[in-house]
C-alpha cells in the first residue's frame, strides 16, 4: 500500500490523529446507490448424520450429540445476517445393502445460505437422527448448487469417516466442479477420523484451496467448528450509519462523530461537512475494500483515494492526503485519512486564509482518483469521523523508545482474524497467536493500548507444500492507529517456505502512546499520540499463477509493553469519538474500555496442497512479484 501526503505548513502536520477510544461495531447498512456491496461469503455447512455418528465420543456421549452442540456454538458465534446454510446427509434411509442406492442420494438441505435463521438452524440440527450412508461427494454437489454462482463462497464439511458411496470419489467431484468453473473453497473437519478418512478429507480441502482440521473429540469439535466457519465467512463487510455525500461543498451533509457508510463512484468526488469547535481537532478517514478479481494485469491493478479539506466559503485549506494500493484485485482494503487542526488556531478575520482557522464548519472532499480494471462502477465507503477538544494539560511530553519484541514462553493461542476493521480479532496482550489465511485474504486483528503502552509484533508465514508459480504470493502487514492512520508496513514475497515480516527488522513497533508524541521531531511517531484499538492487518495475496494453492498458517508474535499512565486532561473533560463519549484520563490513570474476548479456539489447523514444480514459471513469477513489491516500496513521503 502506498500513501503520500502534503500540507501547507508545519503546523498542519503537528496535530496528527487523536484517539478513537471506543468504536463499537456500527450496524450494517446498504449504500443508497447501487448493489455493489461486499458481503460475508455465503457458506454451506454440511454435517455428517450417517449411522456411524451414533457411535461413542471419547469425551462422553455420542458423536451426533457432540456435533449438535458444536453447531449450536457455531450458530451462537455467527454474525447476525451471516449467509450460512445447512445440509446433512444420512438421515432418511438406513445403511443396509438394499438401501444403498437411495442412501447415496440422501442429502437434505435444511437451511438455504440466506441471512442466518439462528432459531431455525438450531431446531433443524436438534431434530437430526443419524441412520444411513456417507455420500460426501454427492453432498458437495448439492452444497455447490445452493450457493451463488459468482463471488467468494465456501463449504464447511464435518465428517467422521470416508465416503461410503464412491465412485465418484469426493476429490473427483471437486475437480469436476472446478472444471465446470465453480470456484468453491471447502474447509473439512475430521471428527475422530482414521488415516484413510483424514487423507480423503485433506484431498478435498487441498483441491479447493481450503483447510483441513482434526477434531479428535467433542471438546475439540466444539472449539474448532465456529472458528473454521468464521474463517470461511471472512470477507470485508462495510458498516456504518447511512450518509449520502454530495457533489458540492455547499450541499454537503453533516457527518457527526462516528462511523458512516456511503458509496462512491469511479473518478467521483463526494463532500461531507464536520462542525469543529474552537480549539478542537477533527479527524476524517475513508476506507474502501476492493472486490477480489482474477485475470487483472499487475501493472493495471491500482486504485487511489484522495482527501482535501475546505473551510468557510469553500476556501481550499491546502490540506491534501492521498493513498493508493497496487494489489486491488487481491481484495485489498485502502484507507486515506486526514487530521484538521485549523480550529486550534485563532481566526483573526483579517484575510481569506483565516477562513481555514478557528471554529467553523469544515468540509472534507473524498475522491476515487485512480481506478483499476474490472472494479464495479460504485463501491461502499466507510467514513470515520472524530472530534477532539483541546487539552488543559497534555501529560508527559517525552517521546520514549520503541517497544521491543520479547519471545513468548507460552504456547500460541488460536485466534480468528476478522474481515474488516469493524470485526477485527482481538489479541489479548503479549503472546503468540495463530490463524490460517486463504489466498487473496486481507485479515484484521486489534490490540488495546492505553496511555504509556506500546506494542511490537512480527508475522510468521508457515511452510506449505509445493513450489513454483502456483505457490508464489505477495505478503504484507500493516499497522494502524485507532483512527486508521497507517503507522508502518512490511511486505515481501512468499514462495511456500517459511517467511517472517518484517524481513529486515526484528519487529514493527510503536513508541509508548503519549499525547505529546504529536509534537515529536520524528514524523512517523506523531500518529502514535493517543490510546485505543490499534489494528494489525495481514494480507496474503493471490498466487501469481492464478490457481488455487494451500492456505498459509500464520503466527503473530506480539509484545505489549509499558504500564498505563495518566493521560491529558481535555478542556471540557471529555473527547467525542465514534459516536460515544470517552472519559478523559484522570490524574491517577487512564480509563480503558473492556476488551472483547477472542474466539475460543485452541485446535491446530493444517493445510495441504499438491507439490507443483515449475522452475521456469517460478522465475517469471518471482520477477512479477518483484515488480509488485518494488511498486509497493514507494512509502509515505
Image: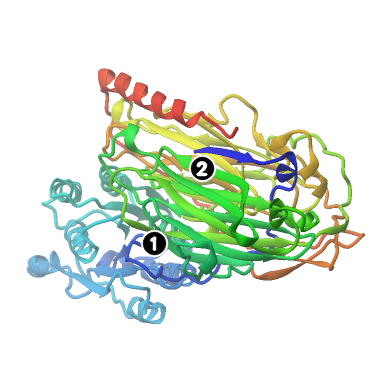
- The answer to whether residue 630 is visible is yes
Query: In this figure, which residue is indicated by the disc labeled 2?
Result: 323
- The answer to whether residue 414 is visible is no
Task: Give the percent coordinates (x, y) of residue 123.
Answer: 36, 81
In the visual, does 166 lie left or right of 404?
Answer: left
Which residue is at the front of the view, 7 or 490?
7
Indicate how the structure is coloured in the image.
rainbow
In the visual, does 83 lie left or right of 288?
Answer: left
- The earlier-in-sequence mark between 2 and 1 is 1
Q: Who's the residue at 44% across and 61% down the image?
A: 237
Callout 2 environment at 10 Å: few (<14), some (14 to 19), or many (20+)?
Answer: many
In the visual, does 389 lie left or right of 39?
Answer: right
Callout 1 environment at 10 Å: few (<14), some (14 to 19), or many (20+)?
Answer: many
Count of number-bearing discs:
2
Task: Give the percent coordinates (x, y) of residue 526.
Answer: 73, 42
Q: Who's the residue at 64% across and 33% down the image?
A: 507
* SS under mark 2: strand
Query: In this figure, which residue is indicated by the disc labeled 1?
Result: 40
| The furthest residue to the front | 350
Task: Give the percent coordinates (x, y) of residue 468.
Answer: 31, 25
In the visual, does 470 lie left or right of 508?
Answer: left
Q: Quadrant of residue 264?
A: bottom left
Q: Quadrant of the C terminus?
A: top right
Task: Give the percent coordinates (x, y) of residue 370.
Answer: 40, 43
* SS under mark 1: loop
Amino acid at each position: 500500500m502506498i500513501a503520500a501526503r502534503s500540507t501547507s505548513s508545519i503546523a498542519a502536520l503537528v496535530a496528527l490523529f487523536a484517539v478513537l477510544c471506543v468504536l463499537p461495531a456500527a450496524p450494517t447498512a446498504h449504500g443508497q446507490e447501487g448493489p455493489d456491496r461486499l458481503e460475508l461469503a455465503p457458506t454451506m455447512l454440511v454435517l455428517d448424520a450417517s449411522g456411524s455418528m451414533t457411535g461413542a465420543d471419547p469425551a462422553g456421549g455420542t458423536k451426533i450429540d457432540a456435533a449438535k452442540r458444536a453447531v449450536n456454538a457455531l450458530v451462537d458465534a455467527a454474525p447476525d445476517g451471516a449467509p450460512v446454510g445447512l445440509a446433512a446427509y444420512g438421515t432418511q434411509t438406513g445403511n443396509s445393502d438394499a438401501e444403498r442406492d437411495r442412501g447415496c442420494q440422501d442429502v437434505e438441505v435444511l437451511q438455504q445460505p440466506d441471512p442466518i435463521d439462528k432459531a431455525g438452524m438450531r431446531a433443524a440440527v436438534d431434530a437430526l437422527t443419524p441412520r444411513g450412508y456417507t455420500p460426501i461427494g454427492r453432498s458437495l454437489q448439492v452444497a455447490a448448487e445452493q450457493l451463488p454462482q459468482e463471488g467468494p463462497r465456501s463449504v464447511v464439511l464435518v465428517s467422521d469417516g470416508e465416503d461410503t458411496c464412491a465412485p465418484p470419489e469426493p476429490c473427483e467431484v471437486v475437480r469436476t466442479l472446478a472444471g465446470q468453473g465453480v470456484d468453491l473453497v471447502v474447509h473439512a473437519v475430521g471428527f475422530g477420523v482414521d488415516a484413510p478418512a483424514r487423507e480423503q478429507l485433506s484431498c478435498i480441502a487441498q483441491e479447493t484451496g481450503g483447510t483441513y482440521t482434526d477434531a479428535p473429540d467433542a471438546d475439540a469439535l466444539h472449539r474448532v467448528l465456529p472458528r473454521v466457519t468464521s474463517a470461511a465467512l471472512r470477507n470485508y463487510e462495510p458498516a456504518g450509519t447511512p450518509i449520502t455525500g454530495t457533489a458540492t461543498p455547499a450541499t454537503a451533509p453533516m457527518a457527526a462523530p462516528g462511523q458512516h457508510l456511503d458509496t462512491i463512484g469511479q473518478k467521483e468526488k463526494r463532500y461531507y461537512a464536520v462542525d469543529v469547535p474552537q480549539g478542537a481537532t477533527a479527524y476524517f478517514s475513508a476506507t474502501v475494500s476492493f472486490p477480489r478479481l482474477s485475470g487483472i494485469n499487475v501493472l493495471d491493478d491500482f486504485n487511489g483515494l484522495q482527501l482535501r479539506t475546505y473551510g468557510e466559503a469553500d476556501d481550499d485549506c491546502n490540506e491534501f492526503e492521498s493513498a493508493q494500493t497496487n494489489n486491488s484485485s487481491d481484495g485489498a482494503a485502502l484507507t486515506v485519512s486526514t487530521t484538521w487542526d485549523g480550529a486550534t488556531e485563532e481566526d483573526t478575520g483579517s484575510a481569506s486564509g483565516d477562513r481555514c482557522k478557528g471554529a467553523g464548519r469544515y468540509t472534507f472532499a473524498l475522491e476515487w482518483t485512480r481506478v483499476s480494471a474490472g472494479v464495479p462502477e460504485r463501491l461502499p465507503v466507510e467514513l470515520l469521523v472524530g472530534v477532539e477538544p483541546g487539552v488543559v494539560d497534555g501529560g508527559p511530553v517525552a517521546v520514549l523508545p520503541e517497544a521491543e519484541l520479547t519471545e513468548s514462553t507460552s504456547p500460541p493461542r488460536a485466534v480468528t482474524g476478522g474481515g474488516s476493521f469493524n470485526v477485527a480479532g482481538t489479541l489479548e496482550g503479549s503472546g503468540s497467536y495463530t490463524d490460517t489465511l486463504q489466498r487473496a485474504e486481507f485479515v484484521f486483528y486489534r490490540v488495546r493500548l492505553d496511555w504509556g503502552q506500546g506494542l511490537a509484533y512480527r508475522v510468521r508465514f508457515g511452510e506449505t507444500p509445493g513450489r513454483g508459480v502456483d505457490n508464489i504470493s505477495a505478503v504484507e502487514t500493516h499497522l494502524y492507529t485507532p483512527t486508521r492512520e497507517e503507522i508502518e508496513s512490511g511486505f515481501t514475497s512468499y514462495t511456500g517456505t517459511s517467511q517472517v515480516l518484517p524481513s529486515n527488522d526484528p519487529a514493527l513497533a510503536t513508541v509508548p502512546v503519549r499525547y505529546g508524541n504529536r509534537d515529536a521531531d520524528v514524523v512517523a511517531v506523531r500518529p502514535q499520540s493517543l490510546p485505543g484499538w490499534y489494528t494489525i492487518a495481514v494480507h496474503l495475496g493471490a498466487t501469481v499463477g492464478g490457481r488455487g494453492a494451500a492456505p498459509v498458517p500464520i503466527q503473530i508474535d506480539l509484545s505489549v509493553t509499558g504500564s498505563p499512565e495518566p493521560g491529558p486532561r481535555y478542556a471540557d473533560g471529555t473527547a467525542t469519538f465514534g459516536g460515544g463519549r470517552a472519559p478523559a484520563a484522570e490524574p491517577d490513570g487512564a480509563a480503558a474500555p473492556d476488551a472483547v474476548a477472542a474466539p475460543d479456539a485452541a485446535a491446530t489447523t493444517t493445510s495441504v496442497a499438491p507439490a507443483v514444480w515449475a522452475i521456469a514459471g517460478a522465475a517469471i513469477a518471482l520477477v512479477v512479484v518483484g515488480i509488485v513489491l518494488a511498486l509497493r516500496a514507494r512509502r509515505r513521503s
